[in-house]
Image (cartoon, rainbow, N blue to C red):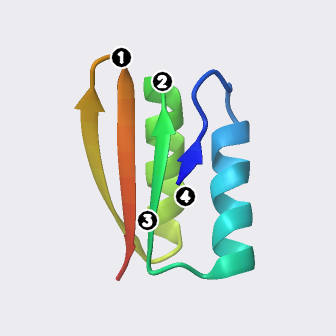
Amino acid sequence: MIDARGLSCPLPVVLTQKEIKNNHPDKIEIVVDNQCAVENISRFADNNSYSVEVKENGEDFNIVLTKK
């Protein structure tokens, strides 16, 4: 799991890219606290063959990426 709360873009996307490049996970969860990060990670995921599921958890967003 990547905890990217408090980080502004593009850092949440960069952390996600790094994790995918280094470990090639079938599933990865990212926690962010802003809508911009949700949109940017979702766009990155779509372009890299991952499906996206977003759940709001209070002020945070849990993003689950699953390899297609």
Amino acid type at mark 4: Phe
Q: Is residue 43 above or below residue 68?
A: above
Q: Which residue is rendered at x = 44% and y = 51% of the image?
A: 42
Quickly name the residue at label 4.
44
Mark 2, secondary structure of its residue: loop
Indicate which disc, 2 or 3, sits on the residue closer to the N terminus.
2
Q: How far apart in space, not on screen, are marks 2 and 1 (Cα)?
A: 6 Å
Mark 1 or 4, nearer chain start = 4
Disc ID at residue 59:
1
Dot 3 crowding, Cα within 10 Å, few <14, some 14–19, many 20+: some
The residue wearing badge 3 is 46
Expressed as whole percent of the image width and height from the top left, the position of residue 67 reads 40, 79
Residue at 44% x, 38% y is: 38
Residue type of the residue flagged with mark 1: Glu
Task: Pick the quarter of the image with the C terminus.
Answer: bottom left
In the rendered structure, find residue 26 and report the number of the disc placed on it.
none
Task: Check the image and report above or below for 52 versus 49.
Answer: above
Residue position marked by numbered label 2 in the rendering? 33
